[in-house]
Image (cartoon, rainbow, N blue to C red):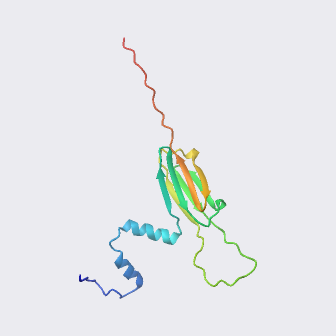
Amino acid sequence: MTNVKFNSRPFEGTLNSLVDNLFTELPVLFRQNFDETMTKGSVPVNVKESANGFEMEFVAPGFAKEDFKVSVDRNLLTVSAERKEENNQEQKKQLRREYSYRSFKRTFTLDEKIDATNISASHINGVLILNLPRKAEVKASATEIKIN
């Protein structure tokens, strides 16, 4: 059995300090991103690369296609969604509420290799899919130089 030393008593203070002590070994950037995701209601994003470009998948169950707004301004791609809560005419007593739909906004910097004018989007089963094609590379044609 290993003896573990604490700087303070393990259950002294608030629960937050105990949790902070447990996770001090995690990289600071990971903790900040995790905290930001949890507090701002952000959605997870998967990015895939192919020969033709990139594909971004935003997992946002409960959002309809009309709730999303995707825009490109200069080299910034912004994806946001907002769902308006409907007020039902018949008032029901709510006994428990464990989930809600939060609005979110994510911004990404586009690489100069992305063709921003041809970005396409689709929405399938709660997943927003953005296709970001690469720009067609202009290759200089080989020319033969005549020797005099």
Vertical position of residue 38 compared to residue 144: above or below: below
Left or right: where does residue 109 sit relative to residue 5? Answer: right
* Percent x, y of residue 30: 40, 66
Using the rendered view, name the quadrant where residue 80 is placed: bottom right
Position of residue 66 in the picture relative to residue 21 (left or right): right
Residue depicted at 55% across the width and 46% down the height: 116
Check the image and name the residue furthest to the front: 1
Residue at image coords 51%, 38%: 136
Name the residue nearer the viewer: 64 or 36: 64
72 or 127, which is in the foreground? 127
Q: How many marks?
A: 0
In the picture, residue 35 is in which quadrant? bottom left
- At a point 50% along the width and 55% down the height, the residue shown is 108
Q: Residue at x 60, y 80 (%)?
A: 97
Q: Residue 1 appears at what percent x and percent y?
A: 23, 83
Q: From the viewer's perspective, is residue 128 above or below residue 41?
A: above
